Amino acid sequence: MDLFIVNTLSGLTYGMLLFLMASGLSIVFGLMRIINLAHGSFFLFGSYVAYAMISRGMNFWLALLLSTICVTVLALLLEKFLISRFHGNEASQVLLTLGLIFVIGDITLWIWGGDFLSIPVPSILDFSFAISESSFPIYRLFVIAIGIICAVLLWYFETKTKVGMIIRAGVDDMEMVGALGFNIKLIFSAVFLFGAALAAIGGVLSGPILGMYPKMEFEILVNSLVIVLIGGLGSWKGAFIGAILIGIIDSFGKIYLPDVSVLLIFVVMVIVLMFKPTGLFGRVES
Amino acid sequence: MLSLEDVHTYYGNSHILQGVNFTVSEGECVALLGRNGAGKTTTIHTISGLTPSKKGKIRFKDHSIEGLPANKISKLHMALVPQGRRVFSSLTVKENLLMPSRPIKHKEKGLKYWTIDEVYELFPALKLREQNMGNELSGGQQQMLAIGRALITNPQLILMDEPSEGLAPVIIDQITDIIRDLKKTGLSILVVEQNLRLACDVADRVLVMNKGHIVWEGTPDVLLNSDEILHKYLGV
């Protein structure tokens, strides 16, 4: 029973980190009809930048803020000078963002080397609580809480605000949103930056749990893509449910079915897509 | 209000509009008729900025609008009711109307100021279904929503692309009445149609388009008595 609770919480923690990454990926995908494959690089780059600051003595929370800003600026530059040139050209965007993964990956390898690094848990959250005979780090509960808070804020933003309405409309028919007087390019850029910032927050928060190592962005990216497909393109709600599902499956799979745990999430994805090709919360094209 | 002068538009390499000239005056309702592939929708898309022209002049009020993006053209108080209606299916009826509504800086003289309540007054059916999603409406209701969504941006010129497409005759009659009512509010209207009757019922002037050119221009009465034009360009 203890093991069950601990594994569930671990799965939720991983799920929430993936949610921060996948929500941005999903909404950018939904709006622009392209996958920003470099989204995982924002996640990893965010944690490396925070590591650099914290290892020089900076406070965790300030480093979280500053590295999120750094990644957002990086995303702004990439969007402005590279990605925006290929709006509407899907093949080019996939190739471009795939290339960016390698470029950003090599830059991080060059600066921080290939060793496994991790960010120390912030002291205020550096203790555990007991679940009868096991113990569970409070930091992970904090990450779960942040994930849930972000989900609630995103839900509120999406369903109750005018900007949320515009973005939902944009996932349906972006051209029509433009014809109604809204600046599509500005919406693209804003959503892209927002998604990058969420990925960076996820990356920094994952630093004390998953650590950082070369090629980690691929692992995060693949899991996030599975989440986006399971949840449905362009849906934050779908990303949230999908992320919890994948987090839990990953956590239990590694314990009960270690030989096939990597395969499990794909099996789940195939099953979901067999019954609902647009994902759990995906829009049906009318 | 609107004038096109030698406008050329391409889709990729195909030369769709090959020098289009016409005008729409203030308060006038102009119908653009023609067979499939004549270039009617491209004309609408070129004016509204969705498919920019390669050559020629387009003036709307005192502005040159060729090359402007669609959102800027919309802000000049031109609205589009697109072919296939394109209502937002993930938004409720109410949200479809709230989303594009914007406070108007200075009221244009003689024009009705549209709020969501005014749209509901024009289309009571939408009020009844305001919590339904856009894709849960019938074709006629979706057309009303598309028109309401255009009106709420408070346009001076409204472009309608085949408002009768796919609708039952009784609904087409309703849409015809609505277009007439809108004309009475002082709105300028350019309506693209395949439905000759609707077009001739609402229009002050009719343009006939063929292969990317305007080939005939005149009043509905004259058109309905020109068997040759009807046969040659409209297949009637």
Image (tube, coloured by chain):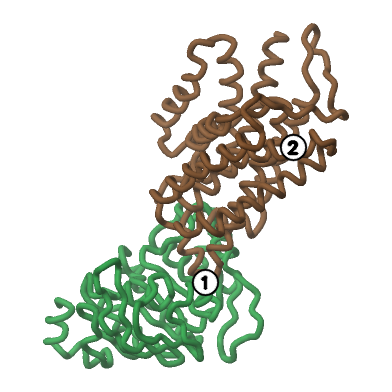
What's the residue type where badge 1 is placed?
Asn
- Relative to B171, residue A250 above or below: above
Question: Residue at the location (46% across, 19% down)?
Answer: A263
Q: Which residue is mark 1?
A: B71
Tell me where residue B73 appears, x and y as whole percent. 50, 77
Foreground tag (2 vs 1): 2
The disc numbered 1 marks a residue on which chain? Answer: B
- Towards the viewer: A98 or B219: A98
**Are labels 2 and 1 assigned to the same chain?**
no
Chain green in the figure, letter = B
Question: Residue at the location (78% across, 30% down)?
Answer: A142
Chain brown in the figure, letter = A
Left or right: where A6 falls relative to A182: right
Query: Of helix, strand and loop, which one carries label 2?
Result: helix
Residue B143 occupies which quadrant of the picture? Answer: bottom left
- Towards the viewer: A54 or B43: A54
Q: Which residue is mark 2?
A: A52
